[in-house]
Image (tube, grey):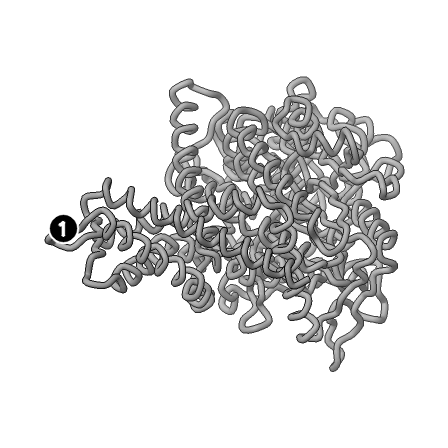
Amino acid sequence: MVRGRWRTAGGALIRVVLVWAASTLTMLALAGILPDFRLQSGDGDSITQIGLTAAWGAGAFGLLSALVWPVLVRALLLVPALVLGLLVFFLNGSLLLIALSLIPAGRGEVAPETAVVVAAAMSAVASATSTALAVRDDEAYRRRLYRLADRRRRRQMRAGAAGANESVPGLVFLQLDGVGYEVLRHACRSGLMPTAAGWLDRSHRITSWRTDWSSQTGASQLGILHGSNFDVPAFRWYEKDTGEVVVCNRPTSAAELQRRAIERTGDGGLLTLDGASRGNLFSGGADQLALVLSVSARRGRANRSRAGYFAYFSDPANAVRTALSFVADAGREVGQSLRARIRGDRPRVARGGLYPLIRAFATVVERDVVVAAVIGDMLAGRAAVYADLVAYDEVAHHSGPRGRDTDQVLERLDRSLALIARVAEHAPRDYRIVLLSDHGQSPGETFLSRYGLTLKDLVRAGCGLPVSRRAGRTHSGAEARTAVLAALHRPVEEDEEAHPGPGSDPVVLASGNLGLVSFPDVPGRASRERIERAHPALLATLANHPGVGFLLVDGVVLGPDGAQARLDVPGEAEELLAPFGPGAAEAVRRTDAFPHVADIMVNSAYDPATGAVHAFEEQIGSHGGLGGEQGHPFLMWPTELSDPGAELVGAEAVHGVLRRWLREADGPQVPVGLRPGGRAGHGPEENPRPERAPGGSFPSVERSLRDETR
């Protein structure tokens, strides 16, 4: 036993020496290349002395990185996340300046701007060397992982955290945001995703499931994690009782939607027993949270969603690697956009301004932090983990669902899956990895690009209201844009969008290829007769427009050329909506029963031959309504788990399957009851499933709190 300990200590010492040597050589090479960096005195030194100076500087820099960096990151947790990512280079450069100042006789000297470059290069080399050595020594790698896991478990026990039975397998649910069933199958067949393809060949099965009419992350993830997405008609909608616009990825809205779902189901969510929620809109009832939007508006210690940033950026090598990848991906987007313009690709949307940074935030920063958090959860032996990887969804909105741009994103996502699978082999318990998506993406030219006007312009024209000669653009509601705004502590929606002013002008909102029209001056849901009395030409203008597929108005579906079908008459809606695929009528019928359904719901036209729709936002890959691949995400599960059964329809059905798999692994999930004082914690004890969800009210913007990135 003593010999084993000496062997372990000796191996660790050798790895430290090798990493030190690699850092020293890197410093020597940079000193020879960069004019503003020197490692010798003004009178000149021998090669031996220069080498010793480099070794001293590399050692001091490594020691400072190990001891000081975690303290710096923890002190900067209150800094907006995006700002912290940009500070990585400068903090690392500052540590190098301090390390060089410790070299005897003042032999180390570097310009501040050069110090940033030198520090980044040294951190990257040290990280690569350390990783290569660990990979070559599987036993050392395994011991390190178990040691980290044991430390985390001891900390949890001292904190009194509830544990789970590690003798049974845990479950990791990885959501590939926006990746449709056919896209995943194509990626596996074509070699883009060898890890996922290998799972399908050896250990997993896959099926497609059907979304609700609102085929977007807010509705799907709320249903999957909390078992109810009742009264979520779209990505954004206007509520007449509060006079506010609800937006699924606004922190205050997400918190309220989660509260409503918990009140309706009487249960805290999928992850209430030793669970972790990473990068999601909603918590799922988990105690361990990172980058979760519904808790990001909280103040004080209750908001632990920044813990994921500390856990990741406390390692300077991680911070530098992510920062370098961020810059590289932003440059990649600029190049891809330029090539698309030169080739004259159609359809195409604007990809300039800050978009390259927004995309890089989604494809690099969020991905790296979420994957690191999942790895930490597995090393800690948590029973259930649900994580959302948003990279594909963001790129597909602007580049289209299929093509070289999205293929590259799928390849990098597959590498993340491979990393998680490797770590699972060393976790303190067995893990079953479930892959799923919340919706797909349908291609198509935007409504504005195809017809030269927005849905709002068309509605105003139908109402006889003035229309601007210059068509405005409807900003994309993609999750990454909100994540960056939240990271910068900026409001998600402009005030006029969050609080439409008083008056009779209609409120027109877009959710992909689903549009919503509400009349603020009409209490409750407007009847068809009232709409036609006030605006005789509106419904015909919308229904007969070539870019519109159908309308829902007061329980009636309206199509082109005067076609109509009542939802309460069996078969009528099924026949009218047949081009939109099986289950379309039932999805519309369910939404029609929502208390906050819009006065007019507008679904864009859909071409079954091409799968194309027309987004009412600036997206050439969109989701949010009916039509095409957007409504067909996937569910991939290990063969050890039971079969999902018949065709899955709706996110709530997926929740039921995931809940069953958790019971199979670790017994029934225990919902948290009523908190002291009668306040609902994870759900009320009485009347757990009322007939209709309560309307609730949203906190006003005046008291909305600082946002947190997802």
User: In the image shown, does 251 or 59 lie closer to the viewer?
Assistant: 59
Q: Quadrant where the N terminus lies?
A: bottom right
Task: Give 302 or 494, whichever is nearer the viewer.
Answer: 302
Q: Nearer the viewer, residue 515 or 688?
A: 688
- Who's the residue at 45% across and 51% down the image? 317
Would you identify the image quadrant in which residue 563 lies?
top right
Q: Is residue 525 visible?
A: no
**1 relative to 140, above or below:** below
Can you name the residue that lies furthest to the left here? Answer: 43
Q: How many marks?
A: 1
Q: Residue at x 84, y 53 (%)?
A: 665
692 displayed left or right of 405: right
Given the current orientation, which residue lies at the most extreme front position? 3
Q: Amino acid at mark 1?
A: Gly
Q: Quadrant of residue 548?
A: top right
Q: Report the residue marked by disc 1.
A: 44
Q: Residues within 10 Å of mark 1 (few under 14, many from 20)?
A: few
Q: Position of residue 99 (x, y in %)?
A: 31, 61
Of 78 and 124, which appears nearest the observer? 124
Q: Position of residue 192 (x, y in %)?
A: 61, 27
Task: Judge left or right: residue 691 versus residue 418.
Answer: right
SS of the residue under disc 1: loop
Residue 122 image offset from top left, x and y in percent: 37, 48
Residue at horizontal 54 percent and vertical 39 percent from the top? 394
**In the rendered image, is residue 9 in sight?**
yes
Q: Is residue 543 above or below residue 505?
A: above
**Residue 183 relative to residue 565: left or right:** left
- Which residue corresponds to the image point at 38% horizontal and 26% vertical from the top-left? 338
Q: How far across and how far down the image is residue 571, in percent?
A: 87, 31
